[in-house]
């Protein structure tokens, strides 16, 4: 929320470089910035934008319906434990996740399944969890990877690999970083 809006002039040069080199842009959309994101998508239709975050999630279906150059990564799909994840103790968070595993997955599926099934080629599992002190802990990483696999495993087998990695792989194929 402290970053400039997605359609701010400060980003124009960055988006032009991304366009010229076929590099996707990863962007955290802030609260209330969905229309600013729409203007950036419209202004740069040949730039693929990968967005992430709680603020844009309620608007992602509408943006995907309007713009073919927007993609979404999901990874922190355990809403009620987000405060514990961001500000709590590592072991308390891990214990809560293990205890609430199936219920959290059911809630995540209820939230994401209609969106993902509407645009199965534009969603991908992500690993953006950089604001956590114990973010790179091996045990936590394993737990969240297992949770992501369990989530993806609840989708039709025909799109599981797409969500896990193939959508991201296809998105990067046009980039100079593909090889």
Image: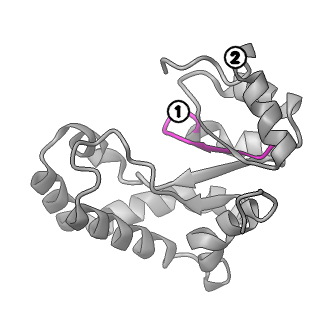
Apparent side of residue 23 relative to residue 142 in the rendered image (left or right): right
> Residue shown at 67%/28% (left/top)?
34
Tell me, yes or no, whether the highlighted magenta stretch contains residue 162.
no
Give the distance between the C-alpha atoms of the residues marked 1 and 2, in whole angstroms: 21 Å
Dot 2 crowding, Cα within 10 Å, few <14, some 14–19, many 20+: few
Q: What element carries label 1?
A: loop
What's the residue at 69%, 16% (across, down)?
A: 10
Tag of residue 55? 1
Residue depth check, mark 1 versus mark 2: number of the one nearer the observer? 2
Instruction: Classify residue 59 by image quadrant.
Output: top right
The stretch in magenta equals 47-56
Q: In which quarter of the image is the C terminus?
A: bottom right
Asked whether disc 1 touches disc 2, contact meaning CB atoms under 8 Å apart, the reply is no
Instruction: Measuring from the top left, give residue 3's x and y in whole percent.
Output: 54, 20
User: Where residue 146 sits in the image (x, y, percent)?
Assistant: 35, 73
Please give left or right for residue 81 compared with residue 120 in the image: left
Sequence order check: which comes first, mark 1 or mark 2?
2
According to the picture, the residue beneath numbered tag 2 turns out to be 10
Q: Is residue 51 magenta?
A: yes
Question: For the view shown, which residue lies furthest in the bottom direction?
Answer: 157
Q: In this view, does 120 lie above or below 68?
A: below
């Amino acid at each position: 929320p402290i970053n400039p809006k997605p359609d701010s002039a400060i980003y124009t040069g960055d988006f032009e470089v991304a366009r010229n080199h076929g590099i996707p842009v990863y962007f955290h959309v802030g609260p209330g910035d969905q229309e600013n994101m729409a203007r950036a998508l419209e202004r740069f239709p040949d730039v693929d934008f990968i967005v992430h975050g709680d603020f844009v999630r309620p608007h992602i279906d509408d943006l995907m319906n309007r713009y073919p150059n927007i993609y979404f990564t999901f990874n922190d799909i355990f809403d009620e434990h987000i405060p514990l994840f961001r500000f709590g103790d590592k072991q308390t968070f891990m214990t809560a996740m293990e205890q609430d595993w199936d219920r959290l997955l059911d809630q995540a599926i209820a939230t994401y399944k209609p969106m993902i099934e509407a645009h199965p080629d534009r969603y991908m599992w992500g690993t953006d969890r950089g604001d956590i002190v114990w973010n790179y802990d091996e045990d936590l990483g394993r737990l969240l990877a297992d949770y992501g696999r369990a989530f993806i495993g609840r989708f039709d087998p025909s799109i599981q690999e797409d969500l896990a990695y193939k959508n991201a792989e296809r998105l990067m194929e046009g980039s100079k970083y593909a090889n």
